[in-house]
Image: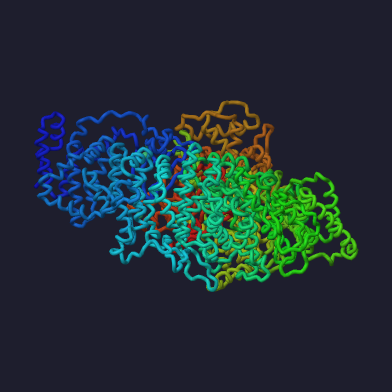
Amino acid sequence: MDTTNSINLTPEQLETGLINGTLDKLALENLLTNNIHENENIDALSQFFIQYIPGNRTMDEFIKQIQEYNNAQICGLVWNANVIAYRCKTCSISPCMSICAQCFQNGNHEGHNYNMFRSQAGGACDCGDSSVMHEFGFCRFHGEDRPQMQTVPRNLICCAELLIPHLLKVFIRALRMSQVSGDIVTEQKLLEILNQLSNGGSALQLYITNALTDRTLYEEFTSDLSMNRMYHNEFLTGEYSNLPVTFFVESLINDSSSDGLVPFDTSLRTMLDEIMMWCVTANLPEDLVRFLLSLLPDFNFKLTFTETFLRFYGVIAQHLVEESLHEQSEIPPRLVHISVQLFSSNIIAEYAMEKCHLIEVILSCIWHMFVPALEQDKQDDDDDENILKIHPLASITDDSSATGMVVDVEHRLIVKNVYWPLLSDFVNILSQEKIALIILENKRYFNLWLRFLTLFQGMNINERILNEHVEYEPQAYMYAFTIELEISAAAMWCFVNHLKPTYSSDNVISIIKQIIDSINDWLQSLNFQLNNTDHWKLSFHLPLHRYLSVFAYNAIYKFNIDPALFLPIHDQNTLLNFMFHPLRTICGYYEVLSNIWLRNGQQVMIQAKTYAKSAFLSSMHDADLFLLQLLSCYIEPNIFIETLLSKFHVYSWLFDSNNTSNLDQGHQIAMLESTLIALCAIVGFQPNIAVRESRRIRPEMIATLSVADRLYSEVEENVPDPSPMSANRKEIETILEEVSVFQTPSVELMGHLQQGKYTIKGTLFETDYDPLHVLIRCTKRAHFQNSLERFTNYVKHEGLFKSDYPIWPPFRIPKYDHPQMSNVQNILQSSVLHHFLFLCLNAYLKDKTITENILYFTIYLLELSILNGKETSPMTTDVNPEETLTFKTNDIFQNMHTLLTPPNENETESIITLLFKILHKQRSNDFIGIINNISIQLKTSNYKNSSRIGDGYYFLTNILHLSSQMNEQCRLIIEQEIEKLKTQYQQRQSTNTKLSDLTAEQKRQRAKNRQQKLLAEIAQSQKKFISQQNPDEHAMHIGTPPSLTNDNFSMEQAMTTTTAHTTIVMEHSIDYECCVCRLTKSDSQSPIGLIGTSCLSLLPSLEFTQLDEYEQKILSYNSNKITLEAYLHLTKQCLTTISGHPYIANYCQNDHHLRSLLIQSCGHSIHVDCLSSYLKALHPNQESVEQPFNNVLPSNTNFRCPLCRQSANTLIPLFDHNDYLNTQINPIDLTPIERLHQSMINPIRPKLKRVFDDRCLLAFLSGLAAKCVSNEQLSPDNPISLPNHQSMKQRAAEFDCGTLRAQLVHEQLFYESANRIDQKNIRKSFYKILHDLHHLGYSFHHQHLWQELTGLQCPTTTAEVFHPEQTLAPVLLRDSITILLQLLMSAPINLTCDEFDIIVQIVFNIEFFKNLLSIIIEQSAENTDLGDLNIFMHLVTKYVKESGINEQLPIKRTMGNSFESQLMNSCLDFFKITSLIKYRLYGKEMPWITGEEPSVLALANFLNLNLNLNGLAMPQWYCNEPVILFTKWLKEFQNSAQQHSIATKILCLKRPHFSPPIFIDIPAKYDDVFHLFNEYRCEYCKKVSSDTLLCLICGEVHLKRWHPLCCVQQRQRFTEHLGKCGHPAAVFLDIPTTLITICLNESYGYWHSLYLDQHGEEDPKLKRGKTLYLDSKRLAVLRTLWLTATFDYQIQNWFSYNPLMISHFDVLL
Ligand SMILES: [Zn+2]
Ligand SMILES: [Zn+2]
Ligand SMILES: [Zn+2]
Ligand SMILES: [Zn+2]
Ligand SMILES: [Zn+2]
Ligand SMILES: [Zn+2]
Ligand SMILES: [Zn+2]
């Protein structure tokens, strides 16, 4: 049957028929039903719908048109996993809110706390949904204020209206069929149509949702006879009866109906129900889910959908468990994908709670998952062992059967995270206040939750291993932490967050009582006995205790509830039972930190650190600590202390003479310290278990900043924040501003780029720094030491601490922010504690292994005890009480002077006598003075010192003062003791002052002080040295390139004496030192060279300029932007036309510098011999270098400088005048021009004396030439045949000049692009050395040129390049710099500065005429009087007129500036290069500072040019008849203009100024970069990849070559691109990481990010997703690094492209 004709109408006829009402609808419906629903050919049916639904247009057109009418209030765009979306905490109401990139960009989130993220499970856009996000975050197309759309025209939609219900029926039928045939359940073709339609927007969605929820329609459908006939209904009933039946948890259902389990209602009433059923049985196929979710913007449908979803929730949960037996289950993320869309909305969630049993459904499913009805399910799951096991902590006795059960964290449901979707749904609905409060107040709900939590109490028990190391480290702990943090704690913080101060206190009390009951039940189920416990079992998981702690905290602080109202304060036993487990966990935590659990492997350490990690500590460590504090207020202090001491393993050790501890001594001391810290923490520390309170944030922030300067993200990370809805970033920022100073990100070429950091304000060290807090927060002791050091530095710097003895941590006197909590001080009034402190003091005194740490904690606790001291018993008159074994009273003052006998000792001591002995131990040399001091101070009645800054002496004497002030008896006893000591020590004093009598402690101290002083001196001299090395402001003006490191190489110093006309200067040349053998050049016979790099650089060719219309016309160039390369190509062609051969053209304009080598050096030198042995040592397997002199460095040898590790591939030979022969010395009585002329007539080439020097030179130059020639072949106008025999040599010479010029051009690039400050960081220039080397190798004399330029007769010799008859291009059309270099190479090697000036002046004469010529040609010069210029003006004007060159060019350019300044300005480029040469050769102060445009006049002055009175540089003549000379030049020009008018015209065009190469423009915000370039579709294989790189040089997008690439062509494309942009280095923006990637031919490396967030911080890999802004300073640094090819400074790690190598960098990220 032909379906497309099943209704006998064309789509057009159908559309018009429906509009006009000419069709009989009933008949049509029947026709459709009959023809469609009996057809099983899905392909044909799909075709039919695609054709008819759009009516008279194609489907694509239809969707496009109807989208125009989309009127949806909510965006609702659905995405799958791995898509980039946004989350805005400022705009969100639900924490699950997310919006699509489009809506984010169309909305306004300026200044909001938002981030970009990669979606894990998929999601949908919430834009426009006011129950999920605030309206101010909506984009302009969504929400109530969106632009209103017109209604859809009838004709557009009428066919869809008719056919959509049928489409859905066919779809459902197809679902049934595919289920039967065992195919994938989603009928792909039909589903595609449905998704397409839904994409069309609100109008179409409405038809779909109406049909889906229409009960009558479904009834008709199922009762349709054809359905029965085709057996479709049978498939349905078959599947339906297989649905698992799931039940509510009994206790959750009304008491009245408690007679049985209530099953979930899974009846099918609508098409939606049936689709849901198929969806569920097929495990939520992604496309189908996506289709259903796309309909959710329709609010009514969302309600119906939620209801249906919850009816099937039980079935899904069941499937979840079953599926978990398979390898990889897709259900969890898909389930969350759906439920997040529903329950994030408070309206939907509340509707679901009231109408659809939301709470019962979820709680029941969770309960069933963990506690399967044991009796029922046992029989069918034999292989599936139970998720619950007998609790290892349960003590099983014969008479009781312990029923304690605990979750097995290694069970597959846990390991595979199967439970996660259900619990995540539960936690998600708890963010709705109404739901959370209902659960809290409904005893049945909350009890079920507590029963559930009980299953996790004490999970993942660790047992200490004593003998061997564990071989297998279980990962189970991760699951345990995930459960506790993401479920138990997450729910807890939701609950607590909703307890507003207005909430009923009675309810809070009853909630806490329920928690207490649960703990009691748990303890009972374990048969728990206080004294019958194993010390060496440790679990970090106590969810119930933590609920108790956190709820109690809130009861006290938020509701001011007396804990006596919920705690059984009179039942000491119960309180001790409650204290047991948290105490065990904290103690275990310290055991692990003290390495007592070392043999259990790394994983126990990870557990301990996770327990106290800032992100989790509020839910774990601090919660436990607070519970201990709370219990300490009610437990009898002596019992409390005794329990604590014995749990910490110190009681028996210290108090018992027969020590039976199983810890070794090191561990014992570590635990002693831990005990003291724990005691201090209980008394003096305020745990952070509040939801975002600024009074808690501030100390946390100070603690983290006191350890180190921090990035913003580090601050955020280190400030605990248990709040589930932490929108309050403002608060962090405000406090951060109060307590710290922001260090803006800094950029330096040489140093590392600093990100923005926060530094603590110094004064806070005085007032707020709390070492105890830092100590509790640090799991690494080194961090605490850091903070103490920073504190010390501050107080010493401020002069607040002057002692030479070590400073003590300034422990603070605690303040309590709630009166209830000040009761923690109860434990200070304990005879056991006092006895313990006594023993600690004694141990410090007697045991050398006990450090001062123990002492300062002890003294701190003693101080707190005294401050809390109350006289409990009437004062005893007995001043000398009998000796006892323990203190008899809790009175600290009494106990201070009570004499005890420490275990295993005979002498009796009191705390007071111990204190004095310790003072003596520490300060025996001035002990008498000290006790005298004390006795004086004791007499001043109001002695008070509140400062916390001091050393041991300060705090020890402070104890004495305090106790004597507070207690009269103490004072008497202390005074007695002092008197006693005075007499005792004064006798001994005389013999006691020798240095040899100092205690070991004192000696150590003195040695340490001396050492520190020495170190400080060294640091000081280093600083001084560095500042000397760095040039000051003055030096920067001069433009002196400073030395990089401490080397004695300074070209400038050597050169500054070069003023006269002699060659004496060379005697001051530098003696280089080899960095391997440390011998200098003059000390050794082996040739020495600079370690350098030579790399091909195309940078000069990338210079560019803007052309105006006039220039475009002359050049016939049809773009307004031209690169230097293109421009020189044009002029070169003209020169070829004029001179007749490209080779001669190159003589007139040498542009080899466009693609030449950039030669650099780190400045270190090495002997040839030393280098070859160094290379041999590096690569022992490689064949030894056979002829080290001839072939010092094979061209492809890469190595690193032995000294500074920078990469290198070249050795630049170093020679000085001692190495040459034949240096010309001309008579001093001649003028410079006479000397020059002499040397031109009798040229003498310098020669190296030693053969091996010559070989080195040859090796170096031919090495360069080899690289150049291979490069030259790239160039299209490569001259193939050369005119004379010297051509090979001449070509080499031209490359030489090109190389020299390339160095100058790169320097010019640097001067024009770098910042002023960058100057001090640039690599040193080695131009002088290169210049001399090339000179040594250059074998030509441009005598003819000399004659042409000067008019002085000069006979040519064999060293001349061309035959005198050879026609060249006119001298006025040649390139001046080329001429200059030719002359310099012909001049003597020891050219003096004044000779140099003459040469410059000679070439300038040409430059002057060239520019005069172009100005006169281009502009209509008015006949103004220009003084001494007139003569030149008139002559040039005359020749220009006669040449006829102006005839085709009637348009003249208007003159901008005055004639003179134009003339000068057009010489600027010539002046710049020439000045750089002079500066580099002679080290003269150059008036050009990096980053600033130099003044033309200043440069002309610097070059000593002939200036007229107006400051105009003028020609100067050296022959008798200059007029003849320049008339000859002009005649040559005139000839050329007449013969080659176009070429001459182009060559006469004023040469534009070319700017340094730039990067492409990149967006200011990274978001924009990301969206533009984050995906790339390969043009060859069509794969889409997101490993993209954006070339900042040309703007192309590439794929990372070092990742598995899509195809070979793409790799080729990358390599070809490197040929274009990779010289010297390609600069890419690595889109997914935000970092800059530098790509060289063989390797690549990562630089920093150009984009920083508002806190000046990078965000590599966009992990935090903050908005990143382009940092222009970093961009400038990057550009300078590029233009100077100096990436080696900042990139240490280079990686090979070899894809097999895993990049370290990627691993690190
Ligand atoms: Zn959106
Ligand atoms: Zn939107
Ligand atoms: Zn926002
Ligand atoms: Zn050496
Ligand atoms: Zn070096
Ligand atoms: Zn490809
Ligand atoms: Zn490129």
Q: Would residue 699 be visible to someone looking at this image?
A: yes
Nearer to me, 115 or 686? 686
Which colour scheme appears in the figure?
rainbow
Q: Would residue 954 be visible to someone looking at this image?
A: no
Question: How many circles with numbers are drawn on the protein?
Answer: 0
Residue 1141 location in percent, x, y?
Answer: 47, 50
Residue at x-position 37% and y-position 40%: 345
In the visual, does 787 lie left or right of 148? Answer: right
Q: Splitting the image into 4 quarters, where does residue 900 fall?
A: bottom right
Residue 998 location in percent, x, y?
Answer: 82, 64
Q: In this rendering, is residue 182 above or below 1564? A: below
Nearer to me, 1275 or 1030? 1030
Nearer to me, 209 or 350? 350
In the visual, does 1018 lie left or right of 588? Answer: right
Residue at x-position 51% and y-position 40%: 728
Nearer to me, 1053 or 1570? 1570
Question: In the image, ligand 6 is in what quadrant?
Answer: bottom left
Residue 919 location in percent, x, y?
Answer: 79, 59
Residue 341 location in percent, x, y?
Answer: 35, 43
